[in-house]
Image (cartoon, grey):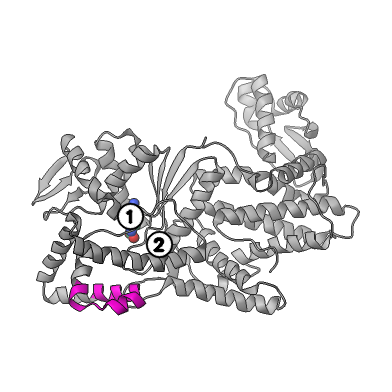
Amino acid sequence: MDIKLMVKQVIQESLDRMIHHDLSIVIEKPKNPDFGDYAIPCFSWAKTFKRSPKEIAEQLALSIHHPLFLKVDAVGPYINIFLDKKQISQELLNQIVLKAASFGSNNDGENQNVPIDLSAPNIAKPFSMGHLRSTVIGHSIANLTAKNGYRPIRINHLGDWGTQFGKLIVAYLKWGDEEKVIQQPIVELLRLYIKFHDEANKHSELNDEGRLYFKKLEEGDPQTLKLWSWFREESLKEFFRIYQLLDISFDYLHGESFYNDKMDEVIELLTAEGLIEESNGALVVQLDENDLPPCLIQKSDGATIYATRDLATAIYRKRNFDFARSLYVVGSEQTLHFQQVKLVLQKAGFDWAKDIIHIPFGMMLQNGKKMSTRAGRVILLEEVLNEAIELAYQIIDQKNPTLENKHEIAKQVGIGAVIFQDLKNFRTNDVDFSFEHMLNFDGETGPYLQYTHARCHSLLRKSGDFVPQIGYSLDEDEAWSTIFLLSQFGEVVKQSWTDYDPSKIARYALDLARSFNSYYAKVRILDSENKNARLHLVFSVATIIKECLRILGIKAPQSM
Ligand code: ARG
């Protein structure tokens, strides 16, 4: 129940009864409470009604009835609505008590499948900031997907195939050391990869060798495959340490290699549709009618590329999951790639190509510069996360030295800080990475929300005997903005999913926490006559903040 939406619907129905016209409704909030909780101006309807706004207001006011309205007045050209706050608060608190974490969920998705392509780091390379963004944004969108009644399918489309693996194998055979790979796989494999490029600049025949080895891979040569799968395994061990820190899991680890045996079909299919053209020995699909550069399908040496694998991937996902939509959470630098893939599928006659949705995001910046993993200066993401945990530990240890379980809570707070900093702004904005900001307990941060949530629980604990029950209402003015916000949660859940925008949840949670904290500063909760009703508000706020944090992929400790 979104209170404002409910008011709008009631007015809409009354208008519809009076006149059949598409009229827009403006809802204002009067500054003076004598004019009610909402005021609806009638000026813009005068033409349609062929009457004065004042007359319309009088007539309409008589026809508006609703059990949650105390009274409806016509004052000049305005209709003033007085809400029954007691009833409304009771209904809302009841619903939160009854539904708990499922409050705000809906069944719009009717259990339809929505594959979500997220994370997708590249084997043998460091897990980058971009992949962190894809991981946390994708994870949160998956949670929103489920909250809106769809079935999310989380797929990690690992970058585990392509010419670079041919090159890496050549480099390993020439200069590699098994022990070093086992000890520090990513660092060592990256070193080999960089060495390969340095050497290839001097001896270009190395590139041919690299291509040859990728060809061997594509053809299934057992020895080459063995090396490749060893690199893959060692890399995955590292990646999964990060996923474990973030507490994120996947339904499928179908990387690019998974589609190796599904590529011929793509080429046959495109050929049968007459879409394939030869260009200097390579195969392409022309997209000039749509002002896009051609999509390369096969290189002149017969190797397939990233785009071909994404075509196979899209077809595979449609066949296996019969999706309602298929989402790809991938950086904005790949926008052209996804436009091309989508268009090629469209041209090939797949009407579901329209359901392929690229969800782009911006970069992670530090001091205004891209946080890069290249250029020799390797920032290992795991170190970044561990540093956030360490800093969180220092803060917690200072604020609350006797807290039990400090290490586990520091982990939840440190990781939560990193995730929230990423998700709090619209995803296409660049993110400014700053330990100092993200760990500020009073700022627009994850720890601020976690702290507010823990504060609520501390109140509930102190009350001694709190048990959530239905039947409580709270019509005090100080509580109203918090109640109003609680009523909007379900709409925010819908809107964030429609826009694939977790920042709507993040912003909403901040508003709710701020509104509650200012309520808490104004009224006494425990030693008041209203104690029980107020505690139900505390419980409701804790429930919804926790649910927002869960959607964002952040834990909510009960004390900190
Ligand atoms: N591994 C790729 C990269 O790091 C991202 C893959 C995204 N998913 C996809 N289906 N193309 O750039």
Q: Which residue is mark 1?
A: 255
Image quadrant containing the C terminus: bottom right
Observer-nearest residue: 169 or 545?
169
The location of residue 81, given as percent across then percent down, is 76, 36
The location of residue 110, given as percent across then percent down, is 52, 35
Amino acid type, mark 1? Gly
Q: Quadrant of residue 319?
A: top left
Magenta highlight range: 171-194
Classify residue 237 as left or right of residue 23: left
Is residue 481 something that shows in the picture? yes
Instruction: Classify 402 as above or below 350.
Output: below
Q: Earlier in the sequence, mark 1 or mark 2?
A: 2
* Badge 2 element: helix
Magenta segment: does it hold 179? yes
Q: Which residue is mark 2?
A: 131
Amino acid type, mark 2? His
**Quarter of the picture for ligand 1?**
bottom left
The label nearer to you, 1 versus 2, is 1
Instruction: Indicate if the residue with disc 2 has its beta carbon within 8 Å of ligand 1.
Output: yes
Instruction: Classify 337 as above or below 522.
Output: above
Magenta segment: does it hold 275? no
- Which label belongs to residue 67? none
Q: Quadrant of residue 516?
A: bottom right
Q: Quadrant of residue 527?
A: bottom right
Q: Are marks 1 and 2 in contact (CB under 8 Å)?
A: no
Circle 2 packing at 10 Å, graded few (<14), some (14-19), many (20+), is: many
The location of residue 374, given as percent across then percent down, is 32, 72
